[in-house]
Image (spheres, helix red, strand yellow):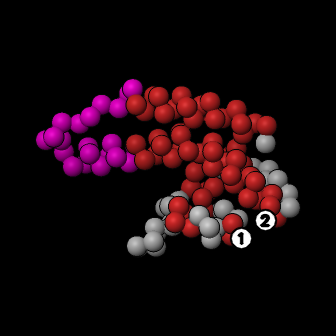
Amino acid sequence: MNKLFANTMASDENWLNLFQMTTPLPKNAEPRDKAYQLFQTIDGVGEGCFKPQLQIIYAFAHKEAKGTWPEDVCGKNFGSLVGGFPITKISPPSIFLRDPEVNISVNQ
């Protein structure tokens, strides 16, 4: 768990990098360029900014649900953390883990 808290500083740095390094596309940019930038932003926010906090939440949820601390939290990517969230802890934050309209998992 001690290793996970150090990642929160990297999360702050990633927010600043996203803010400083993202250049808005011109209005006449190609749709594929817009889509690419959108998915890069989503990936940057998920993996780079929210993942450290999700690792901590995941670890505590795993400990409460299964009685042991997970061993591989640092090795999991954002999608694996969301997809493997302990099932007994999914119901309260289900809106954050699954799209309510088309039922697509966030990790997809």
Q: Residue 60 bears which disc, if any?
A: none
Q: Is residue 105 left or right of residue 63?
A: left
User: Which residues are drawn in magenta?
Assistant: 20-40
The x, y position of residue 80, in whole percent, is 61, 56
Residue 6 is drawn in which quadrant? top right
At 63% across and 42% down in the image, what residue appears? 52
The three-letter code of the residue at mark 1 reads Thr
Q: For the residue labelled by badge 1, is the local secondary structure a helix, a strand or a loop?
A: helix
User: Farthest residue in the front direction?
Assistant: 92
Query: Is the residue under label 1 in contact with that under label 2 (CB below 8 Å)?
Result: yes
At 82% across and 53% down in the image, what residue appears? 69
Instruction: Name the residue carrying label 1.
Output: 88
Q: Is disc 1 surrounded by few (<14), some (14 to 19) or many (20+) residues within 10 Å?
A: few
The x, y position of residue 82, in whole percent, is 60, 59
Instruction: Name the residue carrying label 2.
Output: 65
Q: For the residue labelled by badge 2, is the local secondary structure a helix, a strand or a loop?
A: helix
At 78% across and 65% down in the image, what residue appears? 65
Q: Is residue 36 left or right of residue 8?
A: left
At 76% across and 59% down in the image, what residue appears? 62
Q: Is disc 2 surrounded by few (<14), some (14 to 19) or many (20+) residues within 10 Å?
A: some
Viewer-proximal residue, 93 or 14? Answer: 93
- Residue 104 colored magenta? no
Q: CA distance from mark 2 to mark 1?
A: 6 Å
